């Protein structure tokens, strides 16, 4: 006859167990603290038991908690898998009473969801993307553009000082970082091109390269990417948090259009700030080129200026301006779109913020490519 | 009998505002103790000191033989396993399902197998009559359901001591009565000591063994419910009279 047994803990709070033949016997406290220690050893001991029935003797158990019942249930399930039945006997009244609270009622287990196949998942995802995502995005875009235009001429629904507050938050506060990064980009661009152009004695063309690239591409694109990171994330997280805390629902119940109240002031501030900041980025970037031209290529600022005037055309500046307006719209709409779609709590806000930034940068670069083709396709 | 919680000369202030003024009381095991008083009298502050969310500024708190002033990190972890806390708004983790919420303390504090944890989660949800909410997320639940899930989570480790901050707030009378029954069952069948902060006078009458009445950061009364009801302290009389009005 196989016998396994063990005693753990102090006499008043410990647990003794024994597997003797086809009987499993417990004495003492069948509680979480003890079960954690003996759980795996009892399971191992039960592997050696043969026969179609094992008797469970709890006569000497003086304390049991929910973990105790979970453990007995786990033993029963394990034995059932190997075709052995656990038969309860000698159950003290107190344990029967506790069982009313801690035993799982039959038929209570909710049906598990049937897992979907890969094809079903792809199909459902694609349907959701177009039917829900794309449609909602264009709906929000149309709504925002309509109210942005309407509220430019109507003051009735505009909160006093909101435009200034948003412009400072979105625009003015971004000046230092935009200026610094644009200056460094201008500097690096000039440095890299200077090294090549010097080999051909074409130093002066550094000015052409910097002026054209900054005004047409680098100025608008860099500013928009920085804005997507800085302001796009702020918009998504602000609106997302308001959705989670039911502030957006509260606005709706007060007959306030959340798009008009939350998104439009940001859009106004953005379409005012972004072109100005793009212009700033152009100027500071070119200044970076001037510095490299002066110290590295011995091109005086005056010569650089004259060269800049001769290559700079109005269309380049207008291109940058139009691009920055479109980028501003994309960043605000993307941030708001994700903000309104937040689900769950803090984690949901984090997720939509990341998604808003990634999508906004993608859309900005996509729009830049399309606009580049449109403006400069000969 | 030794008290399960002993509070001696506890004082607390935030900035210049004094919230608790030298309060002392005991909580006996296997009893339902209700801390009550007007809004802003310091009830939640007391509770947060008891569960260790506020650092003690002055006074001593002993819970189950642990002196909170001198408790080590390991002892504190051990103590926390023996206490359940039900927060006023449930404080569920919104990114996790109901089942995952209830499983968190079991997964983090025990070495139980996933099968046993699942069993315990289902039992605790059964205890609060929310078996069907197993796969739902907190955002899909009503306020009362969220609170019951939070209670299931607080009971996950079968704590001998359970603290509840405004468990009845926002619940309908039927759910409230069911919750009261559950509290009585926890005390009677499982011997759990309950500390409730509540304003709900019918619940207090039904559940309370012991009353601690706070007023302006001081303990105005500490004793059995019957004595509180017969008390000639005007604030207490006024508090219970409001039920009749």
Image: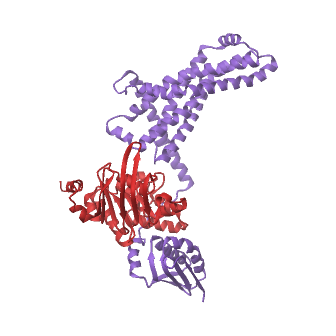
Residue B97 at x, y percent in the picture: 46, 56
Q: Where B29 falls versus A365 (above or below)?
A: below
Q: Quadrant of residue B8?
A: bottom left
- Name the outermost residue toward the bottom: A1
Residue placed furthest toward the right: A199
Front residue of this view, candidates A96 and B204: B204
Residue A135 visible in image = no
Q: Is residue A238 visible?
A: yes
Q: Please give the letter of the chain rendered in purple.
A: A
Q: Position of residue B4 (x, y in %)?
A: 40, 66
Residue A370: x %, y % from top left:
59, 28
Residue B122 drawn above or below residue A79: above
Say how the picture is coloured: by chain
Residue at horizontal 59%, vertical 76%?
Answer: A41
Asked if residue A130 lies left or right of residue A191, the reply is left
Query: Exactly how many numbered labels are in the figure?
Result: 0
Q: Would residue B21 appear left or right of A309 to someone viewing this image?
A: left
The colour applied to the residues of chain B in this rendering is red
Quadrant of the drawing holding the N terminus of chain A: bottom right
Q: Nearer the viewer, residue A317 or B93?
A: B93
Q: Is residue B192 above or below residue A245?
A: below
- Quarter of the image holding residue B7? bottom left
Residue reaching furthest to the left: B245
Nearest the eye: B200 or A48:
B200
Considering the image in quadrants, where does the C terminus of chain A appear?
Answer: top right
- For residue B73, which quarter of the picture? bottom right
Give residue A317's position: percent from left, percent from top: 59, 17
Q: Is residue A271 left or right of residue A213?
A: left
């Amino acid at each position: 006859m196989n016998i396994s047994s063990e005693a753990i803990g102090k006499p008043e709070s410990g647990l003794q167990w024994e597997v003797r033949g086809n009987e499993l016997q417990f004495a003492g406290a069948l509680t979480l603290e003890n079960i954690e220690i003996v759980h795996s050893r009892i399971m191992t001991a039960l592997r050696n038991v043969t026969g179609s029935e094992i008797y469970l003797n709890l006569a000497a158990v003086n304390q049991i908690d929910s973990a105790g019942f979970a453990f007995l249930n786990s033993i029963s399930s394990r034995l059932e898998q190997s075709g052995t039945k656990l038969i309860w006997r000698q159950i003290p009244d107190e344990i029967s009473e506790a069982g009313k609270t801690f035993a799982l009622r039959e038929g209570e287990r909710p049906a598990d969801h049937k897992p979907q196949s890969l094809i079903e998942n792809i199909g459902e995802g694609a349907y959701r993307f177009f039917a829900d995502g794309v449609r909602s995005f264009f709906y929000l875009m149309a709504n925002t553009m309509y109210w942005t235009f309407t509220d430019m001429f109507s003051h009735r629904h505009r909160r006093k000082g909101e435009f200034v507050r948003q412009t400072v938050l979105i625009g003015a506060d971004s000046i230092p970082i935009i200026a610094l990064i644009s200056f460094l980009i201008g500097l690096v661009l000039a440095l890299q091109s200077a090294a090549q152009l010097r080999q051909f004695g074409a130093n002066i063309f550094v000015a052409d390269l910097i002026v054209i690239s900054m005004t047409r591409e680098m100025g608008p694109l860099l500013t928009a990417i920085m804005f997507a990171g800085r302001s796009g994330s702020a918009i998504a997280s602000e609106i997302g948090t308001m959705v989670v805390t039911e502030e957006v629902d509260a606005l709706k119940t007060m007959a306030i259009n959340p798009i008009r109240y939350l998104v439009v002031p940001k859009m106004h501030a953005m379409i005012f700030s972004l072109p100005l900041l793009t212009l700033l980025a152009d100027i500071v970037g070119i200044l970076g080129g001037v510095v490299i031209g002066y110290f590295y290529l011995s091109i005086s600022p005056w010569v650089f200026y004259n060269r800049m005037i001769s290559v700079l055309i109005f269309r380049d500046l207008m291109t940058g301006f139009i691009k920055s307006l479109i980028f501003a719209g994309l960043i605000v709409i993307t941030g708001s779109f994700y903000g309104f779609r937040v689900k769950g709590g803090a984690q949901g806000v984090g997720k939509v913020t990341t998604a808003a930034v990634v999508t906004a940068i993608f859309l900005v670069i996509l729009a830049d490519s399309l606009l580049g083709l449109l403006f400069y396709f000969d | 009998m030794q008290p399960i919680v002993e509070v001696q000369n506890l004082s607390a202030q935030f900035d210049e505002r004094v919230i608790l003024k030298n309060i002392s009381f005991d909580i006996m095991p296997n009893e339902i103790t209700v801390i009550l008083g007007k809004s802003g009298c310091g009830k939640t502050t007391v509770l947060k000191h008891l569960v260790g969310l506020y650092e003690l500024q002055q006074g001593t708190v002993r819970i189950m033989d642990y002196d909170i002033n001198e408790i080590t990190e390991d002892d504190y972890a051990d103590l926390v396993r023996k206490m359940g806390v039900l927060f006023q708004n449930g404080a569920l983790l919104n990114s996790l399902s109901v089942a995952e919420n209830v499983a968190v303390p079991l997964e983090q504090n025990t070495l139980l197998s996933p099968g046993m944890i699942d069993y315990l989660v289902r039992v605790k949800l059964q205890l609060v009559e929310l078996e069907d909410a197993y796969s739902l997320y907190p955002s899909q639940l009503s306020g009362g359901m969220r609170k019951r899930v939070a209670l299931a989570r607080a009971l996950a480790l079968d704590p001998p001591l359970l603290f509840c901050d405004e468990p009845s707030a926002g619940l309908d009378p039927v759910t409230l009565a069911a919750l009261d029954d559950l509290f009585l069952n926890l005390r009677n069948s499982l011997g759990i000591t309950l500390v409730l902060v509540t304003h709900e006078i019918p619940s207090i009458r039904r559940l309370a063994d012991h009353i601690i009445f706070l007023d302006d950061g001081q303990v105005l009364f500490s004793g059995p419910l019957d004595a509180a009801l017969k008390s000639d302290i005007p604030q207490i009389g006024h508090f219970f009279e409001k039920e009749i009005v």
